Amino acid sequence: MIRYATPDDAPDAHRIIREIAEWLIAKGEPLWGPDETSYETLEAIVRAGELVIGRLSGETVACMFLHRADTEFWPEDAPGEALYLHRLAVTRKFAGRGLAHAMLNWAESETRAAGRNYLRLDCVPRAKLIRIYEMAGFVRVDPGPVKVGAHWVIRQQKRV
């Protein structure tokens, strides 16, 4: 079951995000630093109604942020044009079961329901991540990585 989170879901979502951040650091592929995964930030996302969780067998196993605006990574976008996905994470215990794609499909449905034309995201320029999103139907917006603040990212979108 995939749904918008309540404040009670924040600890589980934080655990999943930290688990994935630490796993990637251990692999030598850091993605989210401690300043990007704080509990306080997550609480603000929940209050904004933009945290989504995925549950399986009574356990929270996936989460993502689904923002109504993203002026940092998509400053040129017209208001109301897209929804913006960040921090898609699936706990390692349930990796490889299609949960990331289920979360993406749910986000696409929400994008349509909100009357938006695009679901947009950005990811670090790693071939595996780019491939995951391309297999889900996302296409690159820019010819190469773009720098946003301290981050180099590949921006991708899917028309829904």
Image: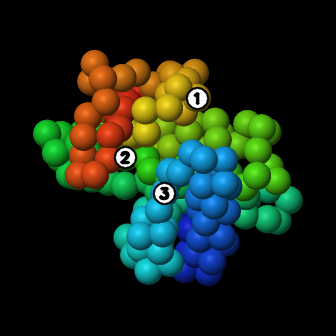
Q: How is the image coloured?
A: rainbow
Q: As shown in the figure, which amino acid type bears the numbered disc 2? A: Tyr
- Label 1 sits on a secondary structure element that is helix
The spot of residue 7 in percent (x, y) is 55, 80
The spot of residue 130 in percent (x, y) is 50, 28
Residue holding disc 3: 32
Label disc, if present, on residue 128 of the rendered structure: 1
Q: As shown in the figure, which amino acid type bears the numbered disc 1? A: Lys
Q: Is residue 158 above or below residue 74?
A: above
Image quarter where the N terminus lies is bottom right
Residue 66 or 111: which is nearer the viewer?
66
Q: Distance between the residues labelled 3 and 1?
A: 16 Å
Q: How many labels does the image show?
A: 3
Q: Mark 1 vs mark 2: give the one in front.
A: 1
Q: Distance between the residues labelled 1 and 2?
A: 20 Å
Res 79 seen here? yes
* Residue 132, quarter of the rendered image: top right
Q: As shown in the figure, which amino acid type bears the numbered disc 3? A: Trp
Q: Which of marks 1 and 2 is nearer the N terminus?
A: 2
Which residue is rendered at x = 37% and y = 55% of the image?
67
Residue 141 or 144: which is nearer the viewer?
144
Categorize mark 3 by other alpha carbons within 10 Å: few (<14), some (14-19), many (20+).
some
Q: Distance between the residues labelled 2 and 3?
A: 17 Å
Categorize mark 1 by other alpha carbons within 10 Å: few (<14), some (14-19), many (20+).
few
Left or right placement of residue 18 versus residue 50 in this view: right
Left or right placement of residue 44 versus residue 19 in this view: left
Categorize mark 2 by other alpha carbons within 10 Å: few (<14), some (14-19), many (20+).
many
Q: Which of marks 3 and 1 is nearer the N terminus?
A: 3
Residue 109 or 136: which is nearer the viewer?
136
Res 3 seen here? no
Residue holding disc 2: 84
